[in-house]
Image: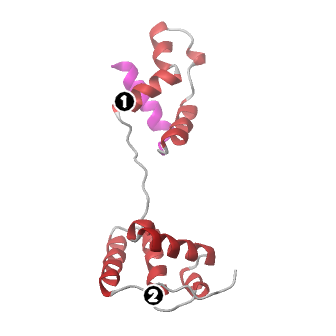
Amino acid sequence: MANKPHYLELDKSAMGELSQFMHRMALKKKWRARRRASAVYSSYKYRMAGQIAQELGCSVVSVYDWLKRYKQHGLAGIADKTPPTKLTPQQVDEIMKISGWSSAYRSGKDRQKAWSFRRITQWIKDNWNITISYERVRQMVHKKLSE
């Protein structure tokens, strides 16, 4: 991809917000979000995408993506997106039903038909876009079964 100019025009208030965002991300040690903000800031300073990528140690495509996300969504577009890590009680109940663990536990048999914890983990990721560890799923199922 050629290093075509791709500058952002930011007013003083947007620059102030960007500067504060970069500072907050540094304090929170969210280096990826800070790097994306640095790319936006560098673009405002009339640097080309290739120069920005080289300075930040990333690809030119990433720089273009970050600039596009900032143009479309502002700071929210370059902030880290953290999926929820906790499941609601309703979600836990649904997992217990579909995985077969409730019926397997009540009947005392057919435990082989119940889903594995890894399968449950993958189902949660696929259906609710929640990243949760295999161990956390195991703990959740055993806690629910002991209630």
Rendered residue at 49%/20% (across/down)? 101
Is residue 55 shown above or below 136? Answer: below
The residue singled out by tag 2 in the image is 44
Which residues are drawn in magenta? 131-147
Q: Which mark is residue 110?
A: none
Magenta stretch secondary structure, dominant: helix
Residue 122 screen position, x and y as percent: 56, 38
Residue 130 screen position, x and y as percent: 47, 44
Q: Residue furthest bottom?
A: 46
Q: Give the SS element for disc 2.
A: helix
Rendered residue at 39%/66% (across/down)? 76
Is residue 123 shown above or below 49? Answer: above
Real-space Cα separation, disc 2 to disc 1, in angstroms: 46 Å
Residue 45 screen position, x and y as percent: 46, 91
Do tag 2 and tag 1 residues touch (Cβ < 8 Å)? no
The residue singled out by tag 1 in the image is 90
Amino acid on which the number 1 mark rests in the picture = Gln
Rendered residue at 59%/17% (across/down)? 113
